[in-house]
Image: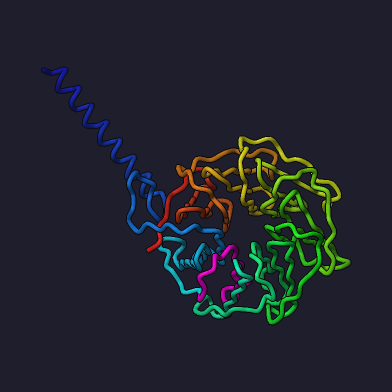
Amino acid sequence: MKRSGVFLARLGRLAGLIIAAQLAITACAGPGETLQEGAVENAFTESLNEVYFINAGEGWIVGNRGTLLHTRNGGASWFSEPSGTTQDLRAIRFVDANTGWAVGDGGTILQTINSGLGWMRQASGTSNRLNGVFFQKNDANVGWVVGDNGTILHTPNGGFSWVTQIGSGNRHLRDVFFRDGDHGWIVGDDGLIFYTNSGTRGALWISQLSGTTRSLNAVNGAGNAVWVVGDGGVFLKTTNEGVSWLRGPQTTATGILTDIKFYGAGFGWVAGEDGIILQTTNGGMFWLARPTRTGAILRSVYFINDKTGWAVGDNGTILYTVDGGMFWVRQFKH
């Protein structure tokens, strides 16, 4: 009986420790809700295509059927905002707390100048699907949009007018990124990479050899390095303005990689199909897969520092991390 009592006491203490650990994990998870089987409260099923944060508190997500989600409390709650369109929205970019653009299907370009309280449609001059938008921070005048059938649009005046620029061919263009005001890249289908430099500043786009025929889906930079990811787990990197593109390090990813983002020169993340998140803490020398506990395609990732970030994707998936991506928490629309 004495041994039985000791066993039961130890069992009780063990159960208490397990419960305490679970409570600690939940308390440290940050805003949102942990992923649990059957969790359907505030479920949201639209595919979400890009997430962008203006600062630690305020962020935006765009998605299919005109979906526009907004948070002012670091993602603790996400609320729908009227976008004024039912077209699928593919990308979003803000230059400051007031001014931003969202682009999508049917040549849709939307602009807000009042922190998202209202969105105005701008004339794009095309009905092609638009997949990417880029403006430098704190420059509300000069921007680019890229899309299907070789679409490259440029504005020198905040979108009052959008002018078509020439690349080559009619392949679908997926993303656009400028390292600074002079040097920019566009990526797209069949391994396409376009480049512009200080001599033309986007007036002329020159084709570069990528060494692959895979679809390239996203481009981003860290220090003097520019990175591209695409289908089939493709990683490309250049440190010489794209004179040569080298295959990045081997990773466990073999499927579609949809997005890449860096914070500073050292920290980077890649998102893709089957819920994959890859993380580097050494400028891309090594990339490690981080568990997300979702099988959804993740289409966008964004970090505001080396610890705090979000990833979004199909079936209304919104994930949040406060430890650089080691642990991800599911968030929901309210």
Residue numbers of the magenta segment = 84-103
**Residue at (76%, 63%) from the top-left corner?**
180
The reply, left or right, for residue 244 in relation to residue 158 is: right
How many labels, in total? 0
Of the pair 183 and 50, the residue shown nearer to us:
50
Q: Quadrant of the N terminus?
A: top left
**Residue at (54%, 78%) from the top-left corner?**
119
Residue 135 magenta-highlighted: no
Residue at the far right in the pictured view: 199
Is 9 drawn above or below residue 217 in the view shown?
A: above
**Residue at (75%, 52%) from the top-left corner?**
226
Is 5 drawn above or below residue 152 in the view shown?
A: above
The reply, left or right, for residue 116 in relation to residue 5 is: right
Of the pair 208 and 222, the residue shown nearer to us:
208
Q: Quadrant of residue 169?
A: bottom right
Is 284 drawn above or below residue 112 in the view shown?
A: above
Q: How is the image coloured?
A: rainbow
**Residue at (59%, 69%) from the top-left corner?**
102
Residue 88 magenta-highlighted: yes
Q: Quadrant of the C terminus?
A: bottom left
| Place of residue 101 in the rendered image (x, y in percent of width and height, measured from the top left) | 61, 72
| Place of residue 328 in the rendered image (x, y in percent of width and height, measured from the top left) | 47, 47
| Place of residue 71 in the rendered image (x, y in percent of width and height, measured from the top left) | 46, 66
Residue at the far left in the pictured view: 1
Q: Quadrant of residue 128?
A: bottom right
| Place of residue 268 in the rendered image (x, y in percent of width and height, measured from the top left) | 63, 48
